[in-house]
Image (cartoon, grey):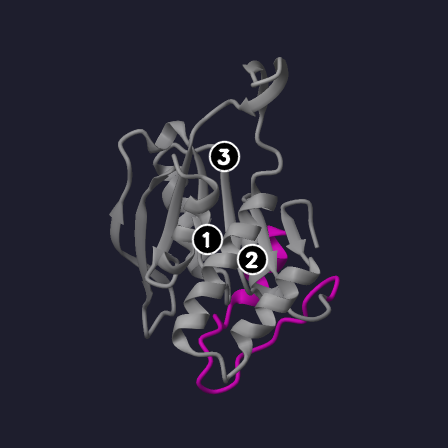
């Protein structure tokens, strides 16, 4: 689906995603599974982190090991749904700092509008993990990515638990590395169309995606 988009199809993730989508799943179990999925996705999202060699004294002898090197990491959830993924990511990256960005969709233009943004002071010096469970058209994701670029951030990744092809193409076109979980087969190229009544799909999404891919 593109060099910037990494689709996770691990059986364990697919199993947990099925639990999330089951209408019989209760609220407490839903929150727990979201956090578990976020932890598992973090494993893949951080696969390319640099390391350096160190010598560690074990109870038996010295051992040649590796530790993380390079920039520190910041987790940026898109409010409010993104908060559900933060604890799961922190389980894997306990030293990461957390920033927050709030976005809502204008009911007339359907454009994302920023209403809150709070970041660590050294955010520009960190690798960014933007988290949001559900990706729809990719408008809010693109706005969040642009916000981080305005802070001077160079390395930005986006983690979504569930994403349709339309939103993934829109998001991947924003030059951000994306880690997405899909449920079911993923087409090579999505068929974009006008939304059905009541859906918040941008009417100009077809042209935006064609121009930016």
Near-viewer residue (176 or 78): 78
Q: Residue furthest front?
A: 60
Circle 1: element type: helix
Q: Which label is found at residue 170?
A: 2
Q: Which residue is mark 3?
A: 155
Q: Nearer the viewer, mark 2 or mark 3?
A: 3
Residue 204 lies within the magenta run: yes
Q: Which label is found at residue 142?
A: 1
Q: Where is residue 62, by image quadrant?
A: top right
Residue 80 at x, y percent in the picture: 32, 62
- The answer to which of marks 3 and 1 sits earlier in the sequence is 1
Residue at the spot x=26%, y=48% of the render?
Answer: 117
Contact flag, marks 2 and 1 (Cβ < 8 Å): yes
| Residue 111 located left or right of residue 185 | left
Q: Work out whether 147 lies above or below 124.
A: below
Contact flag, marks 3 and 1 (Cβ < 8 Å): no
Circle 2: element type: helix
């Amino acid at each position: 689906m593109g060099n910037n988009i990494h689709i996770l199809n691990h059986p364990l993730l697919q199993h947990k995603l099925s639990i999330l989508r089951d209408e019989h799943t209760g609220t407490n179990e839903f929150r727990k599974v979201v956090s578990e999925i976020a932890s598992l996705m973090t494993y893949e999202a951080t696969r390319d982190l640099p390391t350096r060699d160190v010598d560690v004294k074990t109870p038996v002898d010295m051992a040649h090991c590796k530790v993380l090197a390079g920039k520190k990491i910041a987790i940026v959830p898109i409010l409010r749904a993104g908060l559900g993924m933060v604890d799961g990511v922190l389980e894997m990256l306990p030293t990461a700092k957390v920033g927050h960005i709030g976005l809502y969709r204008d009911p007339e233009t359907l454009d994302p509008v920023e209403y809150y943004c709070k970041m660590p002071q050294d955010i520009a010096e960190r690798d960014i993990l933007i988290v949001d469970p559900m990706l729809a058209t990719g408008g809010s994701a693109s706005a969040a990515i642009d916000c981080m670029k305005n802070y001077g951030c160079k390395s930005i990744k986006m983690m979504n638990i569930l994403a349709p092809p339309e939103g993934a193409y829109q998001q991947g076109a924003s030059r951000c590395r994306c880690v997405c979980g899909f449920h079911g087969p993923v087409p090579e190229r999505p068929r974009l169309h006008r939304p059905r009544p009541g859906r918040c799909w941008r009417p100009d999404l077809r042209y935006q995606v064609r121009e930016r891919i």
